[in-house]
Amino acid sequence: MRVDEILDAIYPLSDASRSKITDCITEVRHPKGHLLLRADKIESSIYFIKKGIVRAYAQKADNEITFWFGREGDTVISMRSYVQDQRGYEDIELLEDCDLYELKTEHLRALFNADIHITNWGRRFAEQELIKVEERLIAQQFRTASERYRELLESHPELIQRVPLGHIASYLGITQVSLSRIRAEVR
Amino acid sequence: MRVDEILDAIYPLSDASRSKITDCITEVRHPKGHLLLRADKIESSIYFIKKGIVRAYAQKADNEITFWFGREGDTVISMRSYVQDQRGYEDIELLEDCDLYELKTEHLRALFNADIHITNWGRRFAEQELIKVEERLIAQQFRTASERYRELLESHPELIQRVPLGHIASYLGITQVSLSRIRAEVR
DNA sequence: GGGGAAATTTTACAAATGATAAAAAAGGAT
DNA sequence: ATCCTTTTTTATCATTTGTAAAATTTCCCC
């Protein structure tokens, strides 16, 4: 996936403004299992996924929960680092070998103070992510685990193929054993 | 609470920029029970709460879930209307008589295209809301219902005083009966 | 202050989910 | 292909949470 497609899908930019962003972007490649962002660090980059799939998870004591998956075209970001300059709550792990576009947040911050179109791009990005999370929070309470699984299966069937079910279960807010039961029902 | 305090708490603005917003704001007052925003409408205003408390809830069939409370200083907004010009998923109901600052979204949109400081203000607003929702989504999965209740009790003790427990239960993702059980434990 | 509606708690029972352990299946590396 | 690790499923039992209905308390309006 091309970086300009990714940027324009968030909010269409003029060639001039878009170039200001792409000029700061470098391509990187990391292997499956690599930790792209760490909860214990203040991160200085965000990434756009050219190819591959990743997950964000929070750790607590001995268990972890996956609360986000990113695929081609998605933006990888530690919101807490990016917004508040504090350590985040999430590790981000590559679930496949990934090609990524890297952008230093310092560059983005400078652009947010210089180009109003880019600022609107950043605003729109946060707003869209906000809606997605809000919808998930609501679904979490309205729907049963098995409804949530079936909806995920319909909206993102490739996810179930590409990602271990343990992560999917955690994303759905249930244990892997529960998910296995749900999958058995359907058959 | 003064409107300039509310605006600056989101992101500090120069007097000039802040005035551009406040010039578009009018004060309104509505009684307890009033529906400020409706899920079935594309809303054209956002509000800042001067005084009072409100809740956002989504309806489905015969049950509803409260997924947000707003108090003095908070911003009331139908994200879907505001971002995507589509009908939202939430009704917003006043839980007390409220004094509100009203701002037409058309004015805000115009300002987002004209004043980069206001655009950054809007970006910061969305980012901060995003972090709050993300943290709630994670808490929903990490913590038990009774932990979530106790944390709410600690962080927002006044909420339990001002809001019917049925709404609190729904906000916590449990039934009112469950919440009653949890409250009985503690005593 | 009293009456009635709304909110909250309690109870009993049913259903869903979690924890744990172990077996089965799938996948990767050599 | 085979061994070994990881993933997924299955089974059992304990716990949590939901549903429904009734009892109790609180609140609000007149």
Image: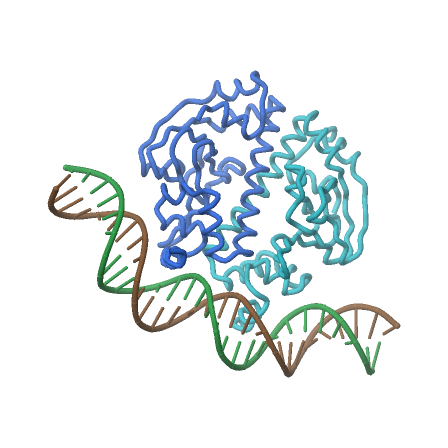
Chain colours: A cyan, B blue, C brown, D green
Q: Is residue A126 left or right of residue B147?
A: right
Foreground of the two, D24 or A82: D24
Left/right placement of residue B9 relative to residue B27 reads right
| Residue most extreme to the front | B187
Please report the residue visible at 77 percent of the width from the left and 55 percent of the height from the top.
Answer: A34
Q: Residue at x 53, y 51 (%)?
A: A136
Q: Position of residue B158 (x, y in %)?
A: 40, 40
| Residue A128 x, y percent position in the rendering | 58, 41
Question: Is any part of residue A89 visible from this angle?
Answer: yes
Tell me: C25 left or right of A32. Answer: left
In this image, A47 relative to B99: left or right?
right
Tell me the quarter of the picture where residue A86 sits. top right
Task: Give residue A14's position: percent from left, percent from top.
Answer: 70, 30
- Count of residue discs: 0
Task: Identify the residue shown where x is 50% and y is 25%.
Answer: B5
Occupied quadrant, residue A31: bottom right
Decide: is A42 above or below B8. below
* Residue A100 placement (x, y as % from top left): 77, 47
Q: Residue at x 67, y 51 (%)?
A: A70
Front residue of B27/A39: it is A39
Let me know if residue B45 appears in the view: no
Residue B181 in the image: above or below residue B68: below
Position of residue B48 relative to residue A148, above or below, is above
- Above or below residue B74? Residue C2 is below
Q: Closer to the camera, A138 or A4?
A: A138
The quarter of the rendered structure image containing the C terminus of chain A is bottom right
